[in-house]
Amino acid sequence: MDIYTLTDLFGWMTAINLGMFILAALLCVFANNYIARVHGKMFGLPAETIKATLYGFLGIYKLLFIVFCLIPWIALKIVSKCM
């Protein structure tokens, strides 16, 4: 696998994960009460706990997205321009 194939792979990984992150963030913003109500009934948790968990989920997802998708893609773009 050459560097250009890896760059394309990480580019698609970045695009797909960014789309999934935006979808999850929009759901957490606009359907927050619905999500809290459904999960509250399923697991018997208060809404505040569920909202805090969703906030933590978005933070961890964003961190993992940056570390494992975005930064490697940027690094590969820089290296491939130097070749």
Image: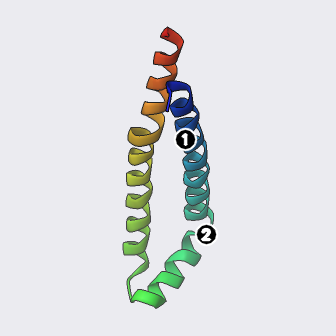
The residue under the point 54% across, 44% down is 13
**Disc assigned to residue 14:** 1
The residue under the point 40% across, 87% down is 43
Crowd band around label 1 with a 10 angstrom C-alpha radius: few (<14), some (14–19), many (20+) = many
Q: Secondary structure at mark 1?
A: helix
Residue 40, placed above or below residue 70: below
Q: Are marks 1 and 2 in contact (CB under 8 Å)?
A: no
> Looking at the image, is mark 1 or mark 2 earlier in the sequence?
1
* Residue that lies at the very extreme toward the top in this rendered image: 82
What kind of residue is marked 1? Thr
Q: Is residue 82 left or right of residue 12?
A: left
Crowd band around label 2 with a 10 angstrom C-alpha radius: few (<14), some (14–19), many (20+) = few
**CA–CA distance in space, label 1 to label 2:** 25 Å
Q: How is the image coloured?
A: rainbow
Report the number of discs. Answer: 2
Residue 64, placed above or below residue 37: above
Which is more toward the observer, 54 or 68?
68
The x and y percentages for residue 8 are: 58, 33
The x and y percentages for residue 1 are: 49, 33
**Disc assigned to residue 27:** none
What kind of residue is marked 2? Ala
The residue under the point 50% across, 77% down is 36
Residue 59, placed above or below residue 32: above
Which is more toward the observer, 60 or 2?
2
**Disc assigned to residue 31:** 2
